[in-house]
Each structure stands twice: as structure tokens, then as C-alpha cells.
Amino acid sequence: MSAEVADKNLAIDVDDSNLQDQESGYTWEEFKRSWDVLQEDDSGSLQKAVASFHKKLKLKRKLKDVNLVQKGLVRLELALQTLEVFVSEFFEQNPLGQIGLIVSRDGLAEKITDLSSNPSDHIRNFRSKKIRDSSGSFSLQNSLMLAINSLKRVPNHGSREIFTIIGSLTSTDPSDINSTISELVSLKIRVSIIEMAAEVFIFKKVCDDTNGVFSVAINEAHFKELTNHFIPPPPILNNTIEAHLMTMGFAARLHDPTPTFCSCRNSRNRNENPNFDSTNSNQQIIIADEVFQCPDCLNMFCLDCDLYVHETVHNCPGCV
């Protein structure tokens, strides 16, 4: 009897569950009253509800801006790591070359290191907090003017090149950048740019007018490949090769029967005087007990004269 009752109860439960599913209906048939979400305050106004809605929108915008900054920091970190390898390999292939670092932030340009051939100084600055602090807008003209002040003192037989990595799509410049481009052309300074975002007209124009190279990095591997392209020295243009002749003169050695000394006294550097030999002489020398003889001219000298000839004059008077 108890088993039959249990079966009946189970059947009733199953029928009830099926009935509840039928009563719930489909999702698109549900009716939602969205205006119930807005709640009035004590005075019957909806200002607090609207203000709360705007606050949520601002919080979403704030989170979105943080994500953009994080992407920029990842891009900056990639550039710094790639430049560390670039500096090391650059000085391996260009031991006489020099590199200086310039950073642009807040519309200004700041020199981090002067032109030098010490890679450890540049790599140490890459890892410092000073160069990783990125903020504000980028200024191409201020960066170029600061680089011109350093490169204008480089002699003509050396190549002058500005290698720039940009992650911005705009440039905040204080004046007309075309005048800066004209100065770069007159000083024969080559500007090359790697853009990490997209192609910008003014950036490409600077490279084209100065015979530089403008490139846009597609991904990390492509960015490293573009950077390694600037490790070998650039080709020398024909209009930059100039031959400067220098007037040089060479002294002629003349043989004169009169005992004289050469004015330049260079003969002692090529032919050292041999040591005088101690010998006995039949001649009577009052001021010396011992006599020294030159093996070439066979003249006799006292000890003081021997020291004077070898330490001061460096030429035997009898041989000259």
C-alpha cells in the first residue's frame, strides 16, 4: 500500500513541474517594465536616478581609458626592450659611432644622454624611471631642433642621422615645421621614422625631404626587423664626398762640412750613439783620470763629456 501511495505522489510532482513549465512561457513573451528601474526621491524628482545613470557611464569611460593607457605602456615597453638590443648591436658594427637619446613628452623634448660611444650609459637610461614616464602630447619639431643642436657640431666626414620611433598620430609644434625641414636639408641630416600606430603625412614628408626612410610597424617581429635595418651605416651620397688637400712639408738632410747640429734633432731618434770605450791614452789629460774613446771617430773624451754627449747632446761632436 505504501509503495502505491509513493508512486501517486511522484506522479503528482511530475505533473506539477510540467504545469509550471507551461505557465512560464517563452523568454520573448516575458513583459518587462523598464520604468520600474527608475526610482523617485522623496520630492518626486528623478534627478538622483539620472545622476546615478550618468555616473555609471563615466565609470565605464574611465575603465576604457585605463585599458588604452595599458596598451600604450605595453607598446613603450616593447620599444625600450628593442632599443636596448639595437644599441648593443649598433656599437658592435660601428665602434666609432655615437648615439644620443632624446625623449618627447608634454609637447617638449628632453635630452637624456649626449652623443657618446658608451653603450652602457644608454642602456642604463633605458631602464630608468625617467625615460619610462610618458605623458602628454608628442612634438616632432622640438625633438628635431634639439637633435640639430647636437648634430651640427659633427664633422662633415661623419654621417648625421636622426632615428625616431613614434607612437603618436599627432604632433604639437610651436611653429612652422617646414623651416625645420629646410634646416635639416641644409645641414645634410637624414631623418628616419618608425611609426608604431599609422602613417602620418608630416612624418613621411620629413623622411622624404631628408632622404630618410619612413616605415609603419605591423607587429612585434616587423618592428624589430625595421629597427635592425638601421644598424649598418647609411650609404654615402656623392654630393657629400669632398676632398680636402693639406699642405705638408718634409725636411731634407744636408751634409755640411762645418760641425753643426740638426735643428730638428730627429737623427738621435733613429740612430743612438754607441757607448764610448774606456781606453788608455798616451796624451796627457789634466782634468781626467780615465779616457773614453768614440768607436766611430776615435776621439777621446773624459767621463763628464761622455755623460754629457749621451744624456744631453745625443750626438758625438767628433762624428757630426
Image (spheres, grey):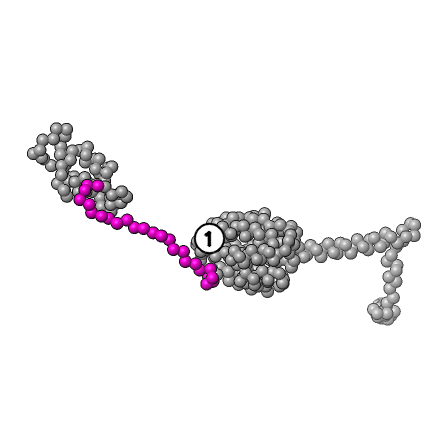
Identify residue for label 1: 155
Asked if one can make out residue 184 in the rendered structure from this viewpoint, the answer is yes
Q: Quadrant of residue 54?
A: bottom right
- Residue situated in front as seen by the camera: 150 or 175: 175
Q: Please tell me whether residue 264 belongs to the stretch shown in magenta.
A: no
Given residues 188 and 198, the one toward you in this image is 188
The verdict on residue 256 being magenta is yes
Q: Is residue 45 left or right of residue 143?
A: right
Residue at x 86% of width, y 69% of height: 29
On the picture, is 177 further left or further right than 316? right
Q: Quadrant of the C terminus?
A: top left
Examine the image and state in which quarter residue 206 appears: bottom right
Task: Left or right? Give the position of 86 relative to 287.
Answer: right
Q: Position of residue 202 (x, y in %)?
A: 62, 61
Residue furthest right in the image: 43
Looking at the picture, tell me which residue is in the foreground, 157 or 70. 157
Which amino acid type is marked by label 1? Pro
Q: Residue at x 17, y 33 (%)?
A: 303
Decide: is 216 above or below 256.
below
Q: Secondary structure at mark 1?
A: loop
Count of marks, rendered view: 1
Give coordinates of residue 191: x percent, y percent.
Answer: 54, 59
Picture coordinates of residue 277, whole percent (x, y): 14, 39
Q: Position of residue 61 (x, y in %)?
A: 74, 56
Q: Is residue 113 left or right of residue 25?
A: left
Q: Quadrant of the N terminus?
A: bottom right
Residue at left offset 60%, top offset 60%: 203
Looking at the rendering, the stretch of residues picked out in magenta corresponds to: 236-260
Most common SS among magenta residues: loop
Tell me if mark 1 has few (under 14), some (14-19) or many (20+) residues whose alpha carbon lies within 10 angstroms of its own.
few
Q: Residue at x 62, y 50 (%)?
A: 108
